[in-house]
Image (cartoon, rainbow, N blue to C red):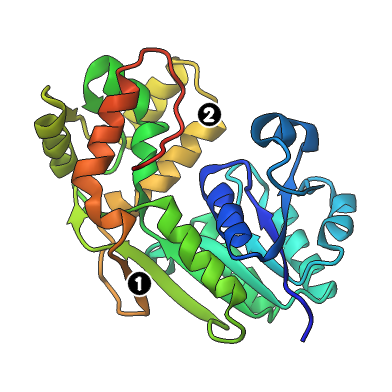
């Protein structure tokens, strides 16, 4: 049996970084795919080995796949689908044995989003795959929700009244590492990765209010109002659209509509109320800090 070597995409982001770290802990040979190697080294140092991969530059595909037999694949929101699908086809041509693709929960009901189309393309290419359909990352509270929480004491996302199960990126990374390394056990499987409890954002605001000792509200803006407000603040429109895309499944209340293999995470994600809010309190009160959450 050939030795496993994994190409990890998104390694400079929250999920990809945790996947790469977990694989290293398991002594699995891996390489991080990045658009800019120097920028990756500047951010992460020499923690990983890097290779250049730019979906807009097909000439980077084969060198990035050289010596690799498995991929942890993420879809960057700013990427054009034809470019991304070209990479998937190249992976097939280069003999990639297995792809673990990070998708979103309830994607099967959302044919208009890129993740649905990406799952279909991987299946069409007949590459052995595992689709990780993840719930809502708790780290979002310390990312694009952070500034509104700090300055206006509100959760400002277009998620409607829908409930979602909060999960930790480290739990997703653990599942990803297992599906990349357990030979044959996860071939052509679809896993919905959920927490053990579902909340809407009114619930989240109440929990945060209780723990932080100040009133946090959930504004529940329309998609149009959210986009207009964020663009007016100076955020890039493509980034704003990506944030909207994250919240569409929740807004449409697509929860538990269909049974499939589900992984209910009892570890990091099960302690949402306590450690998530205390982490927010500890970090967000330090004005001007752009944070990376480390949970204890």
Label 1: how many Cα within 10 Å (few below 14, some 14–19, many 20+) = some
* Element marked by disc 1: strand
Q: CA distance from mark 1 to mark 2?
A: 34 Å
Residue that appears at 19% across and 48% down: 200
Residue that appears at 35% across and 79% down: 260
Residue that appears at 58% across and 59% down: 25
Tell which circle, 1 or 2, labels the residue nearer the N-terminal end.
Answer: 2
User: Could you say where residue 1 lies in the image, as x and y percent from the top left?
Assistant: 77, 87
User: Could you say where residue 195 lies in the image, as x and y percent from the top left?
Assistant: 28, 61
Q: Which residue is mark 1?
A: 263
> Front-most of 228 and 198?
198
User: Could you say where residue 293 lies in the image, as x and y percent from the top left?
Assistant: 41, 36
Label 2: how many Cα within 10 Å (few below 14, some 14–19, many 20+) = some
Residue 212 visible, this orientation: yes
Q: Which residue is mark 2?
A: 237
- Which quadrant holds the C terminus? top left
């Amino acid at each position: 049996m050939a030795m496993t070597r994994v190409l990890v995409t998104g390694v400079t982001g929250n999920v990809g970084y945790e996947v790469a770290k977990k694989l290293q802990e398991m002594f699995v040979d891996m390489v991080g795919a990045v658009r800019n190697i120097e920028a990756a080294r500047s951010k992460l140092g020499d923690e990983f080995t890097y290779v250049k991969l730019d979906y807009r530059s097909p000439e980077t595909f084969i060198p990035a796949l050289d010596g690799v037999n498995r991929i942890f694949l993420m879809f960057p929101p700013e990427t054009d689908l034809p470019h991304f699908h070209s990479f998937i086809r190249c992976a097939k041509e280069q003999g990639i044995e297995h792809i673990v693709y990070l998708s979103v929960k309830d994607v099967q009901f959302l044919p208009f989003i890129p993740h649905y189309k990406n799952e279909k393309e991987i299946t069409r290419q007949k590459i052995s795959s595992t689709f990780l359909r993840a719930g809502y990352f708790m780290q979002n509270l310390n990312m694009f929700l952070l500034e509104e929480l700090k300055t206006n004491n509100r959760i400002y996302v277009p998620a409607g009244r829908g409930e979602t199960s909060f999960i930790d990126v480290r739990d997703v990374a653990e599942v990803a590492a297992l599906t990349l390394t357990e030979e044959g056990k996860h071939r052509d499987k679809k896993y919905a990765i959920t927490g053990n409890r579902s909340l809407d954002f009114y619930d989240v605001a109440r929990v945060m209010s209780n723990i932080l000792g100040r009133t946090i509200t959930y504004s529940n803006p329309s998609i149009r109002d959210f986009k207009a407000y964020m663009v007016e603040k100076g955020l890039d429109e493509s980034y704003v659209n990506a944030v909207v895309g994250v919240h569409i499944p929740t807004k449409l209340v697509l929860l538990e509509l269909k049974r499939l293999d589900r992984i209910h995470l009892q570890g990091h994600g099960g302690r949402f109320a306590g450690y998530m809010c205390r982490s927010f309190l500890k970090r967000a009160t330090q004005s001007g800090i752009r944070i990376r959450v480390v949970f204890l």
